[in-house]
Image (cartoon, grey):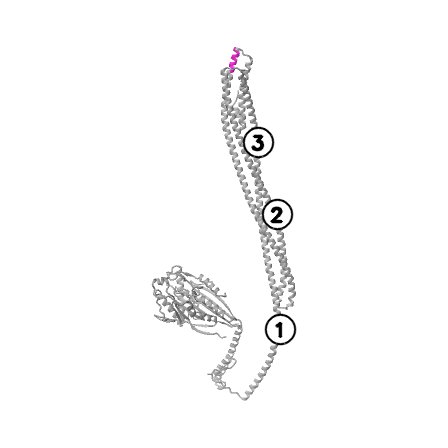
Amino acid sequence: MADVTSECNIKVLCRFRPLNQSEILRGDQFIPKFQGDDSVNGRSYVFDRVFPTNTTQEQVYNACAKQIVKDVLGGYNGTIFAYGQTASGKTHTMEGKLHDPNQMGIIPRIAEDIFNHIFGMDENLEFHIKVSYFEVYMDKIRDLLDGYPDEVMDVIDEGKNNRHVAVTNMNEHSSRSHSIFLINIKQEHTETEQKLCGKLYLVDLAGSEKVSKTGAAGAVLDEAKNINKSLSALGNVISALAEGTKTHVPYRDSKMTRILQDSLGGNCRTTMFICCSPSSYNDAETKSTLMFGQRAKTIRNTASVNLELTADQWKRKYEKEKEKNKTMKETIQRLEAELNRWRNGENVPETERTTADVVRLESVEERSPVMILDNDTSSIVVRISEEERQKYEEEIRKLYKQLDDKDDEINLQCQLVEKLKEQMLDQDELLASSRGDGDKVQAELGRLQVESSCAKTEVKEVLQALEELAINYDQKSQEVEEKGLQNQLLADQLAQKMASLMELEAELSHMQEVSGQQRKRIADVLNGLMRDLSEFSTIVGNGEIKLPVEISGAIEEEFTVARLYISKIKSEVKSMVKRCRQLENLQLECHRKMEETGRELSSCQLLISQHEAKIRSLTEYMQSVELKKRMLEESHDSLSEELAKLQDPGNTSLYTCNTPVHTLHPHISQAVPRQQGEESHRGLHHMQMARLRDEINEKQRIIDDLTDHNQKLQIELAQVLADFDRLKSVDSSKSERFLHERHEQTKQDLKGLEETVARELQTLHNLRKLFVQDLTSRVKKRCLKEKKSESYVNVCARVMQYSQRCCHVLSDWFLAVLLWHEPKEEERFHSIFTFE
C-alpha cells in the first residue's frame, strides 16, 4: 500500500477571552473588533478562524479539533497547542473544567471523542492507546503521571494536580510549565493485518510574562525567565520556518521545541490556538501574539499516513521493486548498446531504436499485469514476417499445451494437498488434545507445587512458632531460676530474722524470770518488814517497853518518815510494774504481726511451688511439641520426595507433548492415584497443622495467663515482703526506741530514787547512830543508877537489833530493785552504802 502524503499549512485559530474581574475594576477597554469569522479589525490579522468572547467550549472544539480525531485514527500525526501571554485563557481552552460537560476543554473532549469513534468502527480493528502526560519546567522534562475515558480523565486529573502553578498579579493559577498530553493510538486490522499508528500532541504552553505586570520575584522570577526563554526559542523556530530560506532550524535550542519538531514543519497536521486578552492594558502583548500567529500560519507541514506494512506486503513490495530494477537495468543496457553503436558510426534502424514511448510502456507494464496505454500515448507499430508469426504461434500453442499439463498437475497436487490438509487437521486435533492433557497435567503439577510451597510456608510458620515458644520457655525458666534464687535469699533472711527473734524472745523470757524472782523477793522482804513493824508496834503499844517520852517521840517520827518513804517506793514499784506490763503487751502485738507476715510468706511460697509445677508441665508439653515437630518434618520430607517423583513424569510428558495421546495415558493413569494419595496426605497434613496451630495458640494463651498471674503474684509477694520488711523495721525501731526510752526513764527514776534513798538511808543511819548512842548511854546510866532488870536490857537490845534489821532490809530491797534494772550496779551501790 502506498503512503498517502499531503502538504498542509499550520491551522491557526485566534480566541479572545472576556474581560476578567480585575480588568473591569481597573477600567480597561475592550479593544478588539471582529470583521468576520476569520479576521480582526484595526490592523487586519487574518487567521483560519477567530472566536469572539461569547464562543462556547463546544463550538471551539467542533471548529478546530473534531476533524483531527479522524485524522489521528486514520494514521496521521496531529498537534493542538495553545500560545499566548499569561492569563489569556490557554489552560481554559485546552483543559477547562474536566468534569463539567459545558466547560470542559479540548483535551477531555478529544478523549471522549476518540473512544466514541473507536466504538463505532469496524469490529475487526484492534486499538492500543497509550497516554503520556509530562511538563517542561525550568527546561527540564518531568513526568506528571486504559481503556476508557474515565481512566484518561483520572490521568489528566493526576497530572494537573502535579503541574507547577503559582500566584501572580495577573493570574491566581498561573501555569509555570509547558504541559504536553500525548495520546498514541495504534490500530490493527485482524483480517488484513494492516497497522496504522497516530500520535496526538495536546500542548498547553506557559504564557509569556512581563515582570513589571506579574510582580514575579524569587523562584517565580526564575520560572518566568525560563518560560520566556523557551517561548523565544519557539519564536525563532517559527521565524526560520516562515522565511523558508534558512537551512538550519534551531529545534535544539529548547527541549520543548525538540519535542514539537514534527509538529512544526514535520510529519504532522497542526492546529495552533493563539489566546489573546481583550484588555487595553495588554495591547502590546496581544499584538505580539497576533503577529506570532500570522508567522506560524505560513509554515507548511508534510503529513503522511504512518502505515506499518506486514511481512507479505513488504515481500510483495520488494519483489515489485526488484522486478522494476531488473527492467530498468535491461533498458539501460539497451540504451548503452544503442549509444555505443551510434558512437561507433553505425546507423541504427528505426525499428531497433529505443524510444521514450517504449520506456513509458515498460513502466506502465510494471504497474499492471495487463498492458494499459494512456490516450495521449502514440501507438507502437511492430512489423514481423509471416514465418516469424507462424513460429510465434507454434510457440504459443506449445505454451498453451504446457499450461494445460501444468493445470492437470496442479489439480493433482491440489487433491494431494487437500488429503494432506485433512491428515494435518487430524494430527492437529490429536496434538491439541495431547497438549490439553499436557496442560492439565502441567496445571495439576503447578497446583501441587503451589500447595507444596504453601505447606512449606505453614511448616516454616509452625517451626518459627515453636522456636518462639522455646525462646519464651527459656526466658520463663530463667525467670523462675531468678525468682527461686530470690526466694532462697528471702528464706535465708527470714531464717536469720527468726533466729534473732528467738534469741530476743529467750532473753525476754530470762528477763521476765529474773524480774519475777526479784518481785517475789521484794514482796517477801516487804511482808517480813511489815510483820516486824507490826510486832514492834504491838510491843510498844502494850507498854512492854517504856521508853522515855523524847526517845519514843523521836522513834515514832522516824518510823512515820520511814512509812512515807516505803509507800512512795511502793507507788513507784507499781508504776514500774505497770510499764513492764505495757511493754509485754507491745511485745505480744509485734509477735502477732510477725506471725501474720509469716503466714502470708508461706502462702506466697505455696503459690511459687504451684507455678513451678505448672512450668514443669509446660516443659513436658514443649517436649511433646518438639516430637510433633520432628514428625511434621519427616512427613514434609516424604511429601517432598513424592512431589519430586510426580514432577519427573510430568516434565517428561510436557517435553513429549507432540507424541500421540495414547503414550500419555499411562502417565496420566499413574498420576491420578498419586494425585489422590497426595491430596489425602495433604488433607491430613492440613488437619494436623490446624490442630497443632490451635493447640499452640491455646498453650500460648495459657502461658500468657500463667505469666500474667505469676507476675501478679510476684508483685504481691514483693509487696508482702516490702510490708514485712517495713513492719519489721518499724517494729525494731519502735522496740529499740521504747527500750531506750524505758532504759533512760528507768535510769532517771533509779537515779532520783537512788539519791532519795541514799539521803534517807544516810539520815536513818545518822538517826540510828544517835538513837543507839543516846539509848545506850541512857540505859547504861539507868542501869547503873536504878539497876533495872535484865529483861529491860534485853528489850533495848532487841529494839536496837530491830532497827538495824530495818536498815538492812531497806538496803537489800533497794539493791534488788537496782539489780533488776541493771545488774552491774551492785558494786556501785555497795560503794555508796556501807552500814556499820
Q: How many marks?
A: 3
In the picture provided, is 671 more to the left or to the right than 234?
right
Q: What is the number of the mark on residue 423?
A: 1
Residue 248 in percent (x, y) is at 42, 70
Calculate the distance from the C-alpha at mark 2 to the C-alpha at mark 3.
Answer: 49 Å
Which of marks 3 and 2 precedes in the sequence?
3
Q: Assign a secondary structure to mark 1.
A: helix
Residue 784 within the segment the image draws in magenta: yes
Residue 687 in percent (x, y) is at 61, 56
Residue holding disc 2: 617
Residue 446 within the segment the image draws in magenta: no
Residue 580 in percent (x, y) is at 53, 30
Residue holding disc 3: 509
Instruction: Give the quadrant of residue 532.
Output: top right
Q: Residues within 10 Å of mark 3 (few under 14, many from 20)?
A: few
Circle 1: residue type: Gln
Residue 802 against residue 132 in the figure, above or below: above
